Image: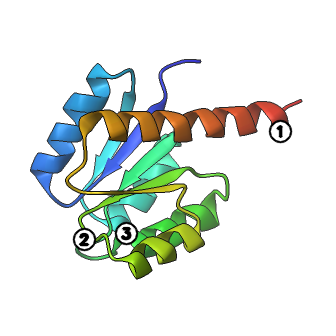
Amino acid sequence: MADPKVLIVDDARFMRMMLVNLLSKSGFEVAGEAADGREAVTKYIETRPDVVSLDIMMPNTDGLAALKQILAHDPEARVVIVSAMGHASMVKDALDLGAVEYIVKPFSPQRIVDVLKRAARRKVLAEDKSGE
């Protein structure tokens, strides 16, 4: 499998930079970055990443609205929520909407790498099966 492509979405520039650095060193191709949900949807359509790291609390369009729009465009999208908002109801809402995983900040670097790789691998496997 080629390096999985990831789209990193977070309104905090330092968080995007940290994730770009970590994921680039961990076998990911960074397909793009977005600072809000509106930009995330546009970048998703442009780059078609294998997996998305998506924050919830962002200006303009929040992460849950972006999640709905991404999945409306591509029902097979693999979106991992990475947020400081760890309330049980928010986690449940995100998973019910179609997020494949929910990681609460602060997170361990190894955990985010493992979760994103697992999510990207599931997408590739699903695409392989649909092409048979």
Identity of the amino acid at label 3?
A: Gly
Secondary structure beneath disc 2? Answer: loop
Question: Where in the figure is residue 114, as x and y percent of width and height?
Answer: 42, 34
> Is 105 left or right of 66, judged from the image as shown?
left
- Mark with earlier residue (3, 2): 2
Choose the circle earlier in sequence order: 1 or 2. Answer: 2
For numbered disc 3, what is the local secondary structure? helix
Looking at the image, residue 34 sits to the left or right of residue 90; the answer is left
Q: Residue at x 66, y 52 (%)?
A: 76
Disc assigned to residue 63: 3
Q: Which residue is mark 1?
A: 130
Give the amino acid type for the residue marked by disc 1 in the picture: Ser
Amino acid residing under circle 2: Met
Q: Residue at x 14, y 57 (%)?
A: 12
The reply, left or right, for residue 73 in relation to residue 116 is right
- Sequence-wise, the earlier of marks 1 and 3 is 3
Tell me if mark 2 has few (under 14), some (14-19) or many (20+) residues whose alpha carbon lies within 10 angstroms of its own: some
Q: Residue 30 placed where, x, y %?
A: 35, 33
Q: Which residue is mark 2?
A: 58
Disc 1 to disc 2, C-alpha distance: 34 Å
At x 32%, y 69%, the residue is 56
| Quarter of the rendering occupied by the N terminus | top right
| 62 on left or right of 14 | right
